[in-house]
Image: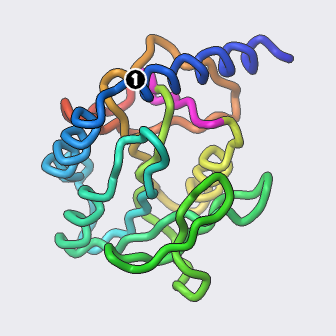
Amino acid sequence: MSDIIAAKARLRAKAIERRNGLAAELRRAAAERVASIGLSFASPPARAVVSGFMAIGSELDPYPLLVRLSGEGHRLALPVIAGKGRPLTFRSWSPGEPLVTRSWGIREPLAGAAEVEPDILIVPLLAFDARGFRLGYGAGYYDRTLKRLRATKPILAIGLAYEEQEVEAVPHHEWDERLDWVLTPAGARRAS
């Protein structure tokens, strides 16, 4: 096992423990706070296609933010796992529409929902640093997806996190894609 892989595994375990230790009330308040901030800091184009995600476990829940973005006229999408080692695809979704639970408990739009290409990705994470590196669960889906999308058009990647998830430095490989912004309940920060 390489040093970077081992460092990521250690940080991943610590990050999950730290996030799981956050009180449920703090997590609920954090979701409402990021929704109140919105995405105006990123100057999204009108009717941008914004991909969110459905929170799993103690992840910061983007649902209130997605409801706000839908109300502002943005089109929403959720990621779909297309297969191991492949980039994510995205299907159109609106708050209240049914979802199906797939691998790892990930909730996705129904198979008949239209496939779309997002302009902005709101990305889950376990840890982040000031440079925009994020630590995910280790499967590389968002790295492959961001690489594919960034090769075809400008795309914004916004990590959604609690302040407690910030670390001094996320160990990373050369293929790890950076976030453009991180949105926490304390506000938005551009990656340096």
Rendered position, 125 above or below 37: above
Q: Position of residue 33 (x, y in %)?
A: 17, 43
What residue would you read off at disc 1? 21
Q: What span is colored magenta in the figure? A: 128-137
**132 magenta-colored:** yes
Secondary structure of residue under mark 1? loop
Q: Is the magenta region chiefly helix, strand or loop?
A: loop
Nearer to me, 169 or 52: 52
Frontmost residue, 140 versus 59: 59
Residue 131 in the image: above or below residue 110: above
Q: Which is more toward the observer, 137 or 19?
A: 19
The C terminus lies in quadrant: top left
- Which corner quadrant of the image does residue 110 belong to? bottom right
Crowd rating for badge 1 (residues with CA inside 10 Å; few <14, some 14–19, many 20+): few
Is residue 164 rendered to the left or right of residue 67? Answer: right
Question: Is 136 colored magenta in this rendering?
Answer: yes
The percent position of residue 44, horizontal first and vertical second, equals: 27, 59
Q: Quadrant of residue 190?
A: top left
Q: Residue at x 44, y 20 (%)?
A: 18
Q: How many marks?
A: 1
- In the displayed image of the protein, which residue is found farthest to the right? 1
Residue drawn at point x = 46 percent, y = 38 percent:
179
